[in-house]
Each structure stands twice: as C-alpha cells, then as structure tokens.
Image: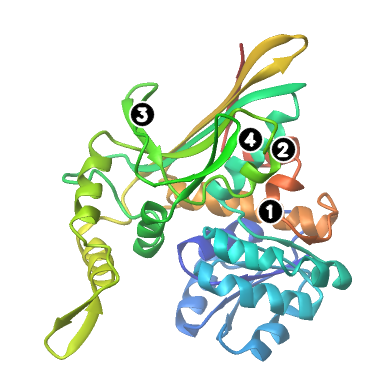
Amino acid sequence: MNALVIGAGMMGSALAYDLAHSEGVDRVMLADINGDRARKIAASIGGKVEPVQLDTQVPEQVTRAMKGVSVAIGATSYTQNLGLTQAAITAGIHFCDLGGNMDVVDRQIALDPLAKAAGVCILPNCGLAPGFASVVAAGGAKRFSALDEIHIRVGGLPQQPQPPLNYQLVFSAEGLINEYLEPAEIIRNGKQERVGSMLDLEELDFPPPFGKLEAFNTSGGTSTLTRMFDGKVKALDYKTIRYRGHCEKFRLLIDLGFAGAEPIVAGASIRTAREFFEEMLRRRLPSNGPDIVLMRVTIRGMAENRSQTLAYEMIDHYDDKLKMTSMMRTTAFPTSIIAQMLSNGTVGARGVLPPEQCVPLAPLLSELRKRNIVVNESLT
C-alpha cells in the first residue's frame, strides 16, 4: 500500500507515523504547502515517509500526487475536503478525511455517483467524533433487535486543567468555535431535530481522578447517524465532555458577541470578532500539554428478548514516550486504520459514504488495541 497524507500538522504527522509503522504499508507521502514542515516531520518519523510540497489550491498538483498512491487522507481544514474529494475521484483512488462540517460532507455525498463510476470509495468524517465514535455507535446498534436510545459522549481534556476555561486547544480554534456555534443534529421523541449547541447541559461521572464532568450539545458529532436511525430510535444525541463550568464561561463569551461575524476596525486592519476571538484563544490557551480523551457510547434497546444497555467506554492518555497527544492518537490512528481497510479490501464499498455506514467495528477495535487504545464494553 502506498498512501498520501495531505497536511503535516498535528493530525497529519500522527497519521504518517501510524502508517509508517503499519505492516503492509510500503510508502507514505506526507504533503504540505510548507515544504520545510513536511521535510522536518518526515525526517523525525523516518523510514517510509517521504516529504512533498503541495498546494491544495492547485488541483493539477493534487491529482498528480494522488496518482502515485492507492489511498489519500485529508488532514487539513474541512474547507479543503470537497476539492480533495474531487481530485481523488479524478485520480481514481480511495480517499478519507477528518471531516467535521456536515455542509461540506453533504456536498461530498452529492458526488456519490461520480465516485461509484470511478470505482473508488470516499469516506468523509473519519477521525474521533465524527468518525470512530460513530462507528462504535453503529456497530453496537447491530446487536439489538429493536433500539430505544443511542447516546455518544466524547471529550478531549487537559490532564492539568488551568482556569478560566479548564481547556487546551487539542485541535484548531476555528474548529472549536464551529462546534460551539453550529446547530447539532439529534433525534428526540422519535423525530429528527436541529438544536442549539452548548445547550442541554448534563452531568456525568467517570472513574477517578475525573469524577463529575459536564457534557453539552455540539455540532457535527452525530455525522449521518440521525439519518441512519430515523424512525428506528426514540433518542440519539452527541455531547462534548468538558470539566464543569466550561460551558457557562464559554457561552458567556459567545453571548457577548466574541464569535460574531461583524467587522471590527483596529488601526489599518479590519477583522471580524470571531477572527479576533480565534487569535486570542490560540494565544491564551495551552495547546501541547498532556491530555486525555474520554469516550462513552451508550445504546439501549431489546436484545435476546429483553431490555439491555450496551456501553462502550474509552479513557486514553497522552503518550509520553512519543510526545503525542491523546487527541492525535484517537483521531489519527482510527483514520489510518480505516485508510488501510480501504486499501486491503476490508471496506469494499464504493461511492461516498461516512464510515459509520460501512466500516466494521470489530476489526477496528482489534487494530486500535494493538496501538494501546482500548475500548471497554459492558452489557447490562
């Protein structure tokens, strides 16, 4: 297998690392518009990783790079994913990305006939959530004869929270604000709804040292699950986990207009309130300290002629040996495994569809265990 990773940021570097250390992968091209960054990351990983300077705004460059591989992975901003999808179809190769914006995903899904005609599979919305957590929910639901509820709770947290927000940037400030602003898709009382993010605050417990945490609606986490289970469940939702108090403080800033689109004149420059807010978050919040990722997926319904609750739980820690955050591990490693499944035929679908619709759960969990990402299961 030859793979192309587009984007040499945190997630791209973790993807390249995992691919380079996976059996059956012969060559990994790590592409970035910043050639020096790509070369630095490639050199730090070594072995099979080759740096490539690539401008995603030049389709000919992207298509040319893609023609030398069997699968490409988009590890850049979600704003690039539609163009990368079109390039992959033109090049005739499989493609997956980290997703995160359903408007973009829907535009990718609209290319399904072209992908099928090209004989390729495009998997948007891989990663952690959406992505891995969605595959867990869909895979677990298959064990029930009838479903009542599916609840997904995921959060990346600093191991050493610092006030006032008790949060560190485990991905982009742009992506964080997008999750907090855009509406969330859920199923409530058996009907699909779009509800406000940062609402429906709830308390939940995790084992020590975490104890009581909070969770609230955020956008994008359900991916296409609300469509898959429309008419099949009474309730389905996704909430982000944070330390207690985070939601109230961040919502105050949003309510005050810090994420607004109106222009603000500062000297000779004009920026929006949101651009200013994003910059302040990048400057003021830590971004590389030891972190932890928590995931809990709870499914209730009928199985074996009785009411049962199936729960999946993951607590993953920062890798001190590799100096790799848990968010990098739990986002990039599932995506790397899914890309390999595309290449080796484990995922044989063609067209454009998110991973919850075609990625088998058992082999994904098995491969993650080899990487010390363990999901515990309980059935009551």
Instruction: Name which of mark 2 and mark 4 comes first in the sequence.
Output: 4
Q: CA distance from mark 1 to mark 4?
A: 13 Å
Q: Residues within 10 Å of mark 4 (few under 14, many from 20)?
A: many
Residue 137's disc is 4
Disc 3 marks which amino acid? Answer: Glu
Mark 2 neighbour class, 10 Å CA radius: few under 14, some 14 to 19, many 20 or more: some
Badge 4 amino acid: Ala
Q: Is residue 308 above or below residue 182?
A: above
- In this rendering, is residue 281 above or below 291? below
CB atoms of marks 1 and 4 within 8 Å: no
In the rendered image, is residue 371 in sight? Answer: no
Rendered residue at 35%/40% (across/down): 199
At horizontal 62% and vertical 73% (from top left) the residue drawn is 82
Q: Which residue is mark 2?
A: 361
Between circles 3 and 1, the one closer to the viewer is: 3
Q: Of circles 3 and 4, which is in front?
A: 3
The answer to the question of whether label 3 and label 1 lie on touching residues, with beta carbons closer than 8 A, is: no
The residue at which mark 1 appears reads as: 354
For residue 340, which quarter of the picture? bottom right
